[in-house]
Image: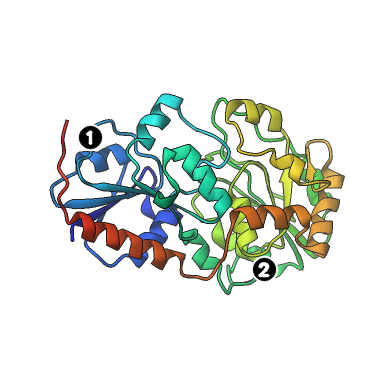
């Protein structure tokens, strides 16, 4: 059985879906940060690549099998962050991918160009951490409040519309003593979002993982981030922030018109802070709505705490079948 190379363009601890499989896999393995470097390290002993981004190399990869374990539930959930040519070249290197439901299987098949038998419905490994957990298990400040809201916007590239200019001082004044909003920056977002200290609005940086905050919130507010499906893994309601949706649709694209799914629970927050708080309170009181249930059912799938083991078992089967026979060919 050959060695398995795990590779990501982010540190292993922050490549959360990949890290869950890494921890579950007990065979010979190596992690290499930077996917092109991982390709350069290809040797006759390598049997499997496990990556959370579609590979970016163009050299022929020999007999090595490549498994795509994406960091978003359906792969690139809301569109592509690179050119069509790069995407097609990367997808040509993928042999297998994982998914969560029949819906996401179809999306991954279309994105990566694989037949159904090579897109395996094994679950989403990072969701294992949510199985059996409840508010308080994340040990964050959110667990100290009766009504705890998490605002976690996605990362913005230069071509994306900017974050909404929310009046955070106004939001802070609207919150009651039993309420808090935690603003959690995406791991790629370097600059503060709030910019000043407030009593009931707290910001946390990109050095901290998001999972503990998802565990401890009562409601998630997010825009175009697949963190919404992490919230659904814990049956948490979501308020969809739609500021800049048209611009994001033009710059990135979306698989579905998600705002239209959300009925009355989506909002352009900028200039509508009072309504935003009312919406968060309503979601906190009433829980997941019809739109939440629809999205969760289509995308999240069953959460049983064993997705990492299933994917690791599949990696093991690939490693045995390949047997370290790969070679680097031009």
Residue 44 lies, with reference to residue 80, above or below; the image says below
Residue at image x 57%, y 63%?
Answer: 212
Q: State whether residue 181 appears in this view.
A: no
The location of residue 265, given as percent across then percent down, is 80, 48
**Left or right side of 199 for 11:** left
Residue 252 lies, with reference to residue 64, above or below; the image says above
The location of residue 129, given as percent across then percent down, is 51, 67
Residue 143's disc is: 2
The location of residue 233, given as percent across then percent down, is 60, 62
Quarter of the rendering containing residue 220: bottom right
Residue at image x 63%, y 48%?
Answer: 152
Residue at image x 42%, y 64%?
Answer: 308
Q: CA distance from mark 1 to mark 2?
A: 50 Å
Residue 66 lies, with reference to residue 93, above or below; the image says below
- The residue under label 1 is 60
Residue 247 lies, with reference to residue 94, above or below; the image says above
- The residue closer to the viewer here, 150 or 64, is 64
The location of residue 137, given as percent across then percent down, is 59, 72
- The residue closer to the viewer here, 326 or 17, is 326
Q: Earlier in the sequence, mark 1 or mark 2?
A: 1
- The residue closer to the viewer here, 85 or 166, is 85
Quarter of the rendering containing residue 317: bottom left
């Amino acid at each position: 059985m050959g060695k398995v190379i795990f590779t990501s363009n982010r540190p292993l601890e922050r490549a959360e879906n990949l890290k869950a499989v890494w921890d579950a896999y007990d065979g010979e393995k190596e992690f290499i940060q930077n996917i092109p470097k991982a390709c350069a390290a290809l040797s006759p002993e390598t049997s499997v690549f496990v990556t959370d981004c579609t590979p970016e190399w163009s050299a022929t990869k020999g007999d090595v099998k490549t498994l795509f374990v994406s960091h978003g539930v359906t792969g690139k959930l809301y569109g592509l962050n690179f050119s069509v040519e790069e995407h097609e070249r990367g997808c040509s290197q993928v042999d297998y991918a994982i998914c969560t439901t029949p819906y996401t299987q179809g999306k991954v098949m279309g994105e990566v160009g694989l037949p159904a038998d090579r897109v395996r419905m094994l679950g989403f490994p990072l969701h294992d951490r949510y199985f059996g957990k409840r508010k308080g298990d994340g040990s964050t400040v959110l667990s100290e409040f009766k009504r705890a809201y998490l605002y976690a916007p996605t990362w913005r590239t230069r071509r994306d519309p900017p974050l909404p200019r929310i009046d955070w001082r106004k939001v802070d004044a609207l919150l009651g003593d039993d309420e808090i909003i935690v603003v959690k920056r995406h791991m790629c977002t370097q600059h503060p979002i709030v910019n000043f200290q407030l009593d009931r609005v707290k910001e946390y940086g990109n050095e901290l993982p998001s999972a503990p905050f998802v565990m401890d919130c009562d409601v998630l507010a997010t825009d175009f981030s697949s963190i919404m499906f992490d919230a659904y893994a814990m049956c948490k309601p979501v308020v969809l922030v739609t500021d800049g949706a048209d611009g994001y649709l033009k710059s990135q694209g979306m698989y579905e018109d998600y705002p239209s799914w959300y009925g009355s629970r989506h909002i352009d927050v900028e200039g509508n802070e009072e309504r935003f708080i009312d919406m968060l309170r309503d979601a906190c009181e009433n829980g997941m709505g019809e739109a939440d249930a629809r999205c969760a059912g289509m995308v999240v799938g069953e959460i049983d705490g064993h997705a990492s083991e299933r994917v690791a078992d599949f990696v093991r089967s690939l490693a045995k079948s390949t047997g370290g026979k790969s070679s680097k060919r031009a």
